[in-house]
Image (cartoon, helix red, strand yellow):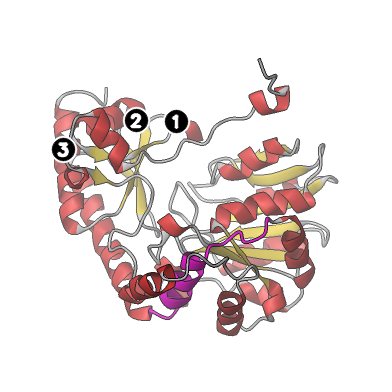
Amino acid sequence: MIPIPDRVRRLAVYEPGRPIEEVARQFGVSSADEIVKLASNENALGPSPRALRAIREAARRVHVYPDGGSFYLRDALARRFGVPSSCVAVGHGSNELIALLAHAFLEPGDSIVMSECAFIVYRLVADLFGARTIATPMRGWTHDLDAMAAAIEPRTKMVFVANPNNPTGTMVGAAEIERLVRRARPDVLLVLDEAYIELLPPERAPDTIRYVREGRPVVVLRTFSKTYGLAGLRVGYAIAPAEVVEALNRVRQPFNVNSIAQAAALAALEDEAHVERTRRMVAAGLQQWERGCRRLGLETVPSVANFLLVKVGAGRAVFEALQRRRVIVRPMDGYGLPEYVRVTVGTRRENAIALRELAAVIADGVSG
C-alpha cells in the first residue's frame, strides 16, 4: 500500500456543484436537458457569440502548443485596465492563481486572513501549504474589513477579500477597502477576489486596480467563468505588482492556459453587449427568486451577484430532495450554514421550474 502523508490525509476536499450528466445518470434521466442546474453560479446565457466564433477558429490549431505567455490576452487586459502587461498574469481559472499565490508566498507556519464565510478554497490552499487560516466573523453577512485588518499577525502573508462574496452575494464598498489597504502592512498581500464584479453596473464597482497602478501590495483576481460564460474553459487573470506576477510565472506550469481558452477570452472581453444582457438577466432573476421565496415564507440574503442564499431549514435534505426532482442547487453545510442552500440565477424558465419544485419540497415537509 502506498502511504499517503498525514498532511494530505488531513486536507478537506472541495465539494463542487454536481454536473448535470452525473445527476442524470444517478436518477435515470434520458436527457441532461431535463435537469435544471442552479448550483455553480454559471452564466445561464452561455458564452458570447464572439467567443463561440473564436473557439471554432482556434480549434483548427489545437495540434500546436498554446502561447505560453498568453501574450495577446495579457496585452488586451493591460490596455483595458491601464497597467503594464508585466502586471498581468493569466491562469487556468482564478482558482489556479489562488494556488500559485500560495506556492509563491506561503510557507509552513505562515497565516492568511479571510472572512469566516467566504470562498472555501482560500482555506483549502492555506492548509495545503501548512499555513494557518485566521477567519474573522462577518458583520451582517458582509466582510468586516476592520476586523480583518486587526487580525493580521506577524506571520500573515495574505488577506483574502471576496468582493462580491461567494457564497453570501454581499459586497463591501470603496471606503472600507481603502481603510484596509491603508491599515495593512506593506509586506502583506491584499488579494481582492472579484470573480463576480462585472455583474455590477460599472459605476457601482470599486476601482481596486488603481491600487496596483499606485504600487500597493494588492492583487486583483478576476475570471472569465462567471459573467463571460466560459467556465468550461477555465481562464482567469490577476492584476498585480510586476514582482508578484514574476513570482507567479516562476511557480506556474508551462502552457497553463490552453489556446482555445485564450482565444475565447480575448473575444469575450470585447463583447460588452453580452455582458449587459447578462446583467439584465441576473437583475431580473434575482427579483424573481426574491419574490418567489417571499411567497414561500423563506428568508434570503440580499445579493448583488448571480446567486442567492436561501434559508430552507435542513439544507442538505432540501438539496437531495430537489435533485430527485431534477433541480440541482448547492448545499451550504460545508460553509457552516447547514440551514441554507445557494441557488444560481438561471433563465426565467429555469428559475420558475426550480421555485415550483422548491415549493413542492417544502410542502412535503422536507425542510423540517
Left or right of residue 131: residue 236:
left
Which residue is depicted at the point 55% across and 41% down?
120
Where is 318 relative to 179, above or below?
A: above
The reply to whether discs 3 and 2 touch (Cβ–Cβ < 8 Å) is: no
Q: How far apart are marks 1 and 3 (CA)?
A: 30 Å
| Residue under the point 19% across and 47% down | 33
Residue type (three-letter) at the residue carrying disc 3: Ser
Which callout, 2 or 1, points at the residue further toward the start of the chain? 2
Question: What residue sits right under mark 3 in the picture?
Answer: 30
Q: In this figure, which residue is indicated by the disc labeled 2?
A: 315
Image position of 362 (left or right of 7): left
- Cβ–Cβ under 8 Å for marks 2 and 1: yes
Q: Could you tell me the amino acid type at mark 2?
A: Gly
Residue 280 appears left or right of 154: left
Residue at 70% x, 59% y is: 190
Give the number of the mark in front: 1 or 3.
Answer: 3
Q: What stretch is highlighted in magenta?
A: 253-271
Q: The C terminus lies in which quarter of the figure?
A: top left
Is residue 11 something that shows in the picture?
Answer: yes
Q: Tell me the SS state at disc 1.
A: helix
Q: Residue at x 50, y 65 (%)?
A: 63
Q: Does the magenta stretch include residue 268?
A: yes
Q: What residue type is labelled 1?
A: Asp
Q: Point out the residue furthest to the front here.
A: 63
